[in-house]
Amino acid sequence: MTTPSMLDAAQLGHLRHWDNLSRQLPHDWSLMHGKGAGEDDFGSYRFQLAYMIYGLALTHRHRLPAAPGVFRPVIQRLIDKLLMPDVWLYWRDVSRGGMVMNAHLSEGYHEEWDPVVRDNIMYSAYVQSCSLLHDALFADERYAAPGSLTFAHWSFFWGGEEKRFAYDRDSLSEHLYWQMVENGYLGIACEPNCVFQICNQPAILGFRLHDMITGGDRADEVVAGYQKAWADFGRLDDTGHYNQMILEDSRVVAPNALQAPWVDAWCGALMNTWNREFVRENYPRQVADFLIPGDDGTISVRSTPAMNVMGQTVVNDTCDTGWVAAWASEMGDRATLDGILAHVDRYMGPTWRDGGLYYPRNDTPTDGEGHRTEIEPMTGNVLLGYARLNVPDGLHELYQQPWGPEHFAEPALTEVGRDVEVSRAEVVDGVLHARVRRLGAGAGDEGAVVIGRLPASARLRIDGQEVGAGDAVRPVPEGLRIDVAPGTAHDVELVP
Amino acid sequence: MSAPATPPADIAFDLVDHHGTPVDAGSWAGAWLLVQFGFTSCRVVCPRALTKLTAALDELGEAADTVRPLYVSVDPDRDTPEVMRAFLAASYPRFTGLTGTAEQVDAAKRAFRVFARRRADPEDPDGYAVPHTAITYLVDPAGRLARHWPDTTDASAIVGDLRALL
């Protein structure tokens, strides 16, 4: 395989920011609060957590394939957060219905605590696909263990007995599959009665990953059924943009009536996994409707005015800028992506904190000269990093080309201390090449890496010099531990 | 609303067969049930599935004697026992047709997690079709779902699976 490039400072900054967010204390969601209340909308914690995991998976798969030690612990911590009740308790209320599009059905709904048992694919598919990404990328069975995906909540102050719902990657995937079957493969609803195209794509990715691990063919079956079911309604609306969703009861399709960028961008980025030609055929015309050229090659993304419903203005993090950037990265549209990144770097306040790069939330629509400045946590924390770290067809390749057993036999950085930055990690012609840099003065394991899966009689070189066992390099049960010396970056090679 | 959809496990249904006799999942003691849902006016999916399953059972030989092929209607308004008997006797005589009241059929659909929904079809003499789940189910003699196949699975793969299971 080829690695596109060594990671640059901005890419490393995004990875560090995700690592920082993954280490926040339980229930500390600093920097992640969006404009909306109640974890209802598109900037919710669940989306930020899931797309950090997707971004980490893409980076590992395509840019740092020989550094599982960078990604595995971060993904595990983010999944831990994804399972926290702060993230899914909204479902107890949303499951009762009552939104504009299902208000007439509310009497048939009841309060549901289990956040994955019915509907709510906008959450369940992320738990499913993220746990399967972990196990597929690390050849692990962590989330196959019974109860490894458990949703639990108990309060001293209210609610009586503990609520506890135990699943694992297999039981959850099985559960989602049968919901798909029962819905004629049209998809599973998000809010009751509302089946979004977007939110069923992660479930399809999850089925594919599950097939990779177990040897089944559920993804092909679901995709075939999905294609057939949506053929009755059309995947695109009359203007050529993606249909947003379908109402289960009436079979009425909701088009992208406002031509909201996030609808096309989010759907297109994800659907490229299994429907590449279709997505690419429509991309140039669709994206052209959303872009505003600026000065010096900058490009901003327009948003549609907030909806007004029942006399209320809908408060929502659209994440238009972030989703169009992510979509452009998946399409390999370098010009658009570079233009958007130039705009956000100039007008959206890139900020470094604890070694991490992000763009802090800003609710002000524009600056005095009309340049767009509004940015949501989902875009500033997650999607711009995702776009920078993705490669053309990144998700597509992740879906279509799983790693085989030969990958997991190659030497790799299986453990990476928090104080070490890894900007290169790949195996070329049997030789492990890594570039590592010590960030600060972290003690002990924080400043060390472990090379695991060592070939017999392998020789270690650091900065071109062969190195034997000593104070800084020593055998450990997992392989070879290296204490990374402070200062500039070091090139590490393991030659079989 | 999507109902909770745990995988089908213990299968239960109460229907009538194409002779008008009430039947349930225990009516064929000791047999494996090979179950296909559909409707006799179906022009493409059902004929293809029933032809494939007939070929699979032919290929299976004597082992097929332990299998009871069932064809369950999702269109009880049109698929009376008489209609199903005539339809199956003409082209798919291995199969026993099952139908019932709308409530009985709905309960059977829920038991197997089957989707079916009537929609307009100008090419149909009655003006409607009933698109439906085309999965084939295998229920073991204890009444538990043992296997299922999407309609893309070919006859030889089904034969291989049946030989391994029976």
Image (cartoon, rainbow, N blue to C red):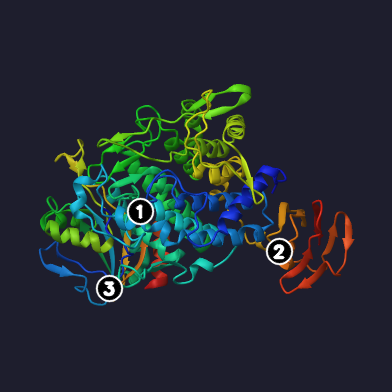
Residue drawn 70% across the image and 44% down it: A9
Q: Position of residue A239 (x, y in %)?
A: 37, 27
Q: Dot 3: few (<14), some (14–19), or many (≥20) neighbours within 10 Å? A: some
Nearer to the camera, B132 or A378: A378
Residue named by callout 2: A446
Protein chain holding label 2: A
Task: Give the side of residue B44 with respect to residue A176, left or right.
Answer: left
Query: What is the CA distance from the residue labelled 2 to the residue labelled 1?
Result: 39 Å
Give me the residue at 43% from left, 47% from top: A201
Q: Which residue is mark 3?
A: B143
Q: Looking at the image, tell me whether mark 2 or mark 1 is earlier in sequence order.
A: 1
Q: Secondary structure at mark 1?
A: loop
**What amino acid does circle 2 point to?**
Glu
**Mark toward the viewer: 3 or 1:** 1
Q: CA distance from mark 3 to mark 2?
A: 56 Å
Residue mark closest to the camera, 3 vs 2:
2
Task: Determine which quarter of the picture holds residue A343.
Answer: top right
Q: Are marks 3 and 1 in contact (CB under 8 Å)?
A: no
